[in-house]
Amino acid sequence: MDQSNSPVTLPTWDEFASNECNEIELLLDAFPIITASNIKAVSYNGLSLSTTPVTLFTINKESTQYTSLRNWANDHMAQILQLKSSKPSLLKIPSITPITNLPQVKDNIIWIQASLSISNTTQKLWYLACSNCNKSAPKDCESRFTCPNCNSKNCEPNPRSILQLDAHDETGALPITLFGSDAESVTNIKSEKICTMETQEHDELIKSINDSKNNKTYYIRVTPSVQQAYGQEIKRWNVKEIELGPLN
């Protein structure tokens, strides 16, 4: 984050993950000033950054820009601390599983790397959720209600994002559903805004996500769940975490 107050994730991999990221992680509590050159930027649905084979990092290098940013950070430390407490410091991906291999995987922590697209272009992108359990609020509920799902009283119906997507890698595709902040991380739009969208805005948002399929990839952590359907056990995959990955 810099003086614009807009945090941006810069995913790293290969030698950057084992070298520069390890060094930065040791300095996180001191809030290092980092310069990155020769990075790739894509502006579909918000700014996304990615390292390239010739990216160069410098850490706490004295310069006019360093001094300006350090002074700004000192003056806005409360805001920076709040942001730091709300997000994981560094995302480390243990290993990537090809989508086609998912049925054979027995682990409970599985990461895939995939691009995303939307085939159901008329889907509703939000629903009214219980403020306590995030499950669907009853139809025609009042401003306060007793939730039939969690039995909590005085719950509020809040708009919550939902996004049905197809995750693609070189081996296959996987249908996934994102909720809440995970869905917002793809749309870059808060639930409160999505629920007020007109039809044209909805269609433009769907198109922008599909247009970015060839430019953006995501790291997605999924876990298996077994459900009964028509007398058979069906394994489904639930998204537990999603982060922007390297740009194409």
Image: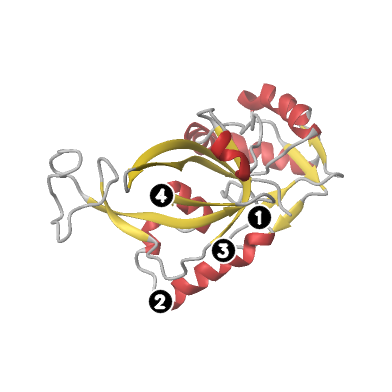
The numbered mark at residue 179 is 4
Where residue 239 sits: x, y (%)? Answer: 47, 42
Q: Amino acid at mark 1?
A: Lys
Where residue 213 sits: x, y (%)? Answer: 63, 60
> What's the distance in space between the residues labelled 2 and 3, CA to CA?
16 Å
> What's the distance in space between the residues labelled 2 and 4, CA to CA?
21 Å
Residues at discs 4 and 3 in contact (Cβ within 8 Å): no
Q: Amino acid at mark 2?
A: Thr
Residue at image point 12% right, 45% down: 146
Q: Earlier in the sequence, mark 2 or mark 3?
A: 2
> What's the distance in space between the residues labelled 2 and 1, CA to CA?
25 Å
The numbered mark at residue 199 is 2
Q: Secondary structure at mark 1?
A: loop
The numbered mark at residue 188 is none
The numbered mark at residue 209 is 3
Q: Earlier in the sequence, mark 2 or mark 4?
A: 4
> What's the distance in space between the residues labelled 4 and 3, CA to CA?
16 Å
Q: Is residue 76 visible?
A: no
Residues at discs 2 and 4 in contact (Cβ within 8 Å): no
Most distant residue in the bottom direction: 200
| Circle 3 crowding by C-alpha within 10 Å: few under 14, some 14–19, many from 20 | some
In this picture, residue 236 sits left or right of residue 14 = left
In this picture, residue 90 sits left or right of residue 139 = right
Q: Is residue 130 visible?
A: yes
Instruction: From this view, report whether residue 31 is shown above or below residue 137.
Output: above
Instruction: From this view, report whether residue 215 is shown above or below residue 11.
Output: below
Residue at image point 14% right, 50% down: 144
Residue at image point 47% right, 69% down: 121
- The residue wearing badge 1 is 216
